[in-house]
């Protein structure tokens, strides 16, 4: 991989063009309704956490939030010619699946600490039935490593009906993206071991996302 693909550095021009085209498509094809967009802080590091039912979810959140955002994407996508060139320039960060990718975690921590916006799907993979499943600890690990970090829950309603697993083309289903109020998690003085802490934070993430249904 070239250096830009490893770091996932955003190219503002390419990002804005892709975001504009995606926004037009989503607005016309899915009649997207955006709720609570004012809840995303206008500056400083922000962690967005959302349910994940479809390949549509990253662009749906990206076209809802006015700030440029970074994403995590499975490493295999960066092996696809041209597509890898695009996603590496719109903020996608390659992550190895099947274990803890320390490099990706460090990259996410650096981005948030430097005031960027990062989108994560705590489930780690797309839902099979449209309902949220088990939440992994990755988002909690990253959130707990950045002091005083605002965490913003997002619920995407309709993307599973529009483009579930095993479909080749999306259906023109109405989609609503709901953005909740930011919250923070305690990082100091927590009287529990790391595993219990991550489990507790992950459950909180799940509850906050589902509260927007």
Image: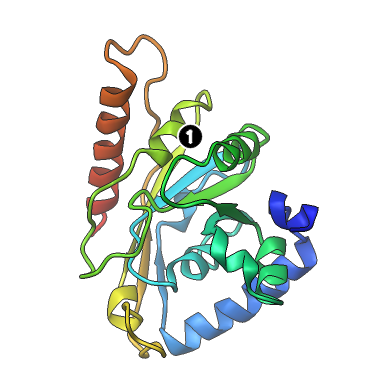
Whether 176 is drawn above or below 90: the answer is below
Q: Position of residue 37 (x, y in %)?
A: 46, 57
Q: Is residue 60 left or right of residue 53?
A: right
Instruction: Look at 48% across and 63% down and name the residue there.
Output: 61
Q: Nearer the viewer, residue 28 or 61?
A: 61
Q: Residue at x 63, y 68 (%)?
A: 79
> x%, y% of residue 192?
27, 14
Q: Quadrant of residue 83?
A: bottom right
Left or right relative to 74: residue 167: left
Let me know if residue 82 appears in the view: yes
Is residue 2 positioned above or below 135 on the image? below
Residue 151 x, y percent position in the rendering = 43, 39
Name which quarter of the figure residue 184 lies in. top left
Q: Mark 1 = which residue?
A: 142
Q: Is residue 158 visible?
A: no
The quarter of the rendered structure image containing the N terminus is bottom right
The image's colour scheme reads rainbow
SS category of the residue bearing label 1:
helix
> Against 125, is 23 above or below?
below
Q: Residues within 10 Å of mark 1 (few under 14, many from 20)?
A: many
Q: Is residue 26 left or right of residue 122?
A: right
Question: The C terminus is located in which quarter?
Answer: bottom left
Nearest the camera: 17 or 129? 129
Across the whole image, how many numbered discs are drawn on residues?
1
**Residue 2, image x and y in percent?**
79, 57
Give the camera-side residue of 59 and 177.
59
């Amino acid at each position: 991989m070239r250096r830009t693909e490893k770091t996932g550095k955003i190219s503002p021009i390419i990002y804005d063009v892709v975001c504009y085209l995606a926004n037009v498509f989503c607005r016309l094809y899915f009649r997207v309704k955006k709720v609570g967009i004012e809840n995303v802080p206008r500056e400083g590091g922000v962690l967005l956490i959302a349910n994940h039912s479809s390949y549509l979810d990253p662009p749906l959140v990206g076209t809802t939030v006015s700030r440029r955002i970074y994403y995590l994407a499975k490493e295999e996508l960066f092996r696809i010619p041209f597509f890898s060139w695009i996603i590496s320039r719109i903020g996608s960060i390659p992550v190895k699946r099947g274990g803890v990718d320390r490099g990706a975690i460090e990259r996410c921590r650096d981005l948030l600490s430097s005031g960027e916006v990062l989108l994560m799907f705590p489930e780690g993979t797309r839902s099979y039935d449209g309902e949220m499943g088990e939440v992994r600890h990755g988002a909690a690990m990253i959130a707990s490593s950045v002091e005083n970090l605002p965490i913003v829950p997002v619920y995407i309603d309709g993307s599973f009906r529009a483009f579930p697993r095993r479909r080749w083309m999306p259906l023109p289903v109405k989609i609503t993206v709901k953005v909740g109020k930011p919250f923070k998690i305690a990082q100091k003085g927590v009287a529990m071991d790391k595993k219990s802490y991550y489990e507790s934070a992950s459950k909180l993430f799940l509850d906050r996302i589902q509260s927007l249904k």
